[in-house]
Amino acid sequence: MISVVVPAHDEAAVIGRLLGQLTSGPPREGLEVIVVANGCRDDTAQIAGRYGPGVRVLSIPVPSKREALLAGDQAATGFPRIYVDADVELGSEDVRALAGALARPGALAAAPERVLALAGASWLVRWYYDVWARLPEVRSGLFGRGVIALSGAGHARVAGLPPLLADDLAASLVFRPDERVIVPGARVVVHVPRTAGDLLRRRVRAAMGVNQVEQAEGGPGTSARTRPRDLLALVRAEPRLAPRVALFLAVAMLARRRARREVRRNQYSTWLRDESSRA
């Protein structure tokens, strides 16, 4: 049994595009999808419930991804266990490809290839992600994909992590490169922010998450911060990227400055998600 857990907070506008792909085609044996609607003020749970017996829907009152993941874990019956953000697109064949990769000796965690959906995004957002997607840590890490698949042993390791904003980053960092795999036969579509304001909100949250990961007791003790030499290598390889790298740095610096302010105020509970990608 492959268990797919989908935490969903007010995702009525987009959850259908994910569940439609996970449940498309003839009924699939050995695959269960559990949607955990957490603190929803919209009809996320009702929409998810329309996708038939292959999708189980749980509702919890608190708007918390961590609590949703815990509830989904308690309801799930099998491994591999695949955690999927409600705002991405992933198909059932992608799920099976991830599960197949975890059957290999030594593989504890897996993620799909990332496809960025840039339609409707401003030029500034496009420039930012043109640099971001080329960074070595971004290309090899499990984070920033909205999907992480874990074997039973991989799940046991992640279960010991403390509550963190950047849960996907922390989950990536606890595995050595030889223990995690990016699966070429699986693809996830990640919808990026469309506006500069929404991009900045997302990056502030990411910067806060990195700060929290680095300081958390019982956390990985390291992070995947962008290194200046990686940016310089990009410009040397493709000089045309210089203006885009400059923009990337400006956004990163502004996000870190605002993140430090939020950290001083202990505002880790602030949602700070972008809504433009969910339109």
Image: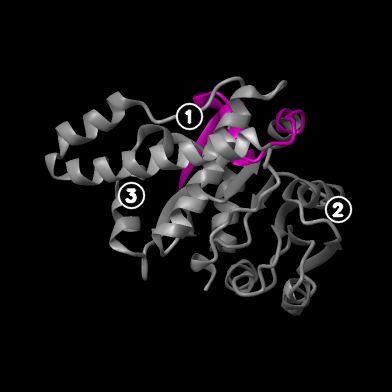
Q: Closer to the camera, 198 or 12? A: 198
Which comes sooner in the sequence, label 3 or label 1? 3
Asked if residue 206 lies in the magenta stretch, the reply is: no
Dot 3 and dot 1 residues touching (CB under 8 Å): no
User: Foreground mark, 1 or 2?
Assistant: 1
Q: Quadrant of residue 217?
A: top right
Measure the C-alpha gap from mark 3 to mark 1. Answer: 17 Å
Which label was assigned to residue 53? none
Which comes sooner in the sequence, label 1 or label 2? 2
Q: Closer to the camera, 244 or 236? A: 244
Which label was assigned to residue 75? 2
For label 2, count other residues whose C-alpha is less than 10 Å away and answer few (under 14), some (14-19) or many (20+).
some
The location of residue 202, given as percent across then percent down, is 51, 51
Asked if residue 173 lies in the magenta stretch, the reply is: yes
At 36% from the left edge and 26% from the top edge, which residue is drawn? 227
At 76% from the left edge and 33% from the top edge, which residue is drawn? 159
- Mark 3 — residue? 128
Dot 3 and dot 2 residues touching (CB under 8 Å): no
Given the image, on which type of amino acid does mark 2 rest? Answer: Ala
For label 1, count other residues whose C-alpha is less than 10 Å away and answer few (under 14), some (14-19) or many (20+).
some
Which label was assigned to residue 224? 1
The location of residue 233, given as percent across then percent down, is 22, 29
The location of residue 37, given as percent across then percent down, is 77, 63
Measure the C-alpha gap from mark 3 to mark 2. Answer: 39 Å
At 72% from the left edge and 77% from the top edge, which residue is drawn? 47
